[in-house]
Amino acid sequence: MSIGDYLFYSFVGICVVFCVLLLLMAVIKIMMYEPRAKGEPIPEGAAPAPAEAPAPPVPLAPGSAGDVKLYDTDPRDAALIMAIVADELKKPLNELRFISIREVRK
């Protein structure tokens, strides 16, 4: 094959890739305008409709001790630690009292 053939096949390959990318972009744009229950299109950058009224605060579970102070710890990691401790002790989480959780670095 000559250099011209290689260039032609490279050009065709690049065109195919860009056509597929344009097709994917069009599909994503169409999916953004999925009609709501009322049949209205969702405008770009629109926030979801606000709830009618905020939910009342959830009362603490019986035996709950309240807040936990976190020091250099992500809330997700603290929740995982509390769940693991409750599981190891075979006790419900609301019967345990966590005062603070601190990450220990060596």
Image: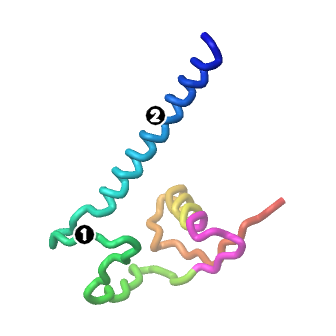
Residues in magenta, as a range: 68-78
Q: Is residue 46 above or below residue 24?
A: below
Q: Measured from the top left, where is residue 82 in percent x and y? A: 55, 65
Camera-nearest residue between 73 and 46: 46
Q: Which residue is tagged 1?
A: 41
The Cα–Cα distance between marks 2 and 1, rounded to whole angstroms, is 31 Å
Q: Measured from the top left, where is residue 65 in percent x and y? A: 51, 82
Q: Which residue is tagged 2?
A: 16
SS assignment at label 2: helix
As shown in the figure, which amino acid type bears the numbered disc 2? Val
Label at residue 96: none
Quadrant including the N terminus: top right
Q: Is residue 10 magenta?
A: no
Q: Is residue 69 left or right of residue 94?
A: right
User: Which residue is rendered at x = 37% and y = 76% of the image?
Assistant: 46
User: Which residue is rendered at x = 64% and y = 80% of the image?
Assistant: 69
Camera-nearest residue between 92 and 74: 74
Q: Is residue 69 magenta?
A: yes
Q: Is residue 36 left or right of residue 26?
A: left
Q: Can you name the residue that lies furthest to the right here?
A: 106
Q: Measured from the top left, where is residue 11 in percent x and y? A: 54, 30
User: Which residue is rendered at x = 33% and y = 61% of the image?
Assistant: 32
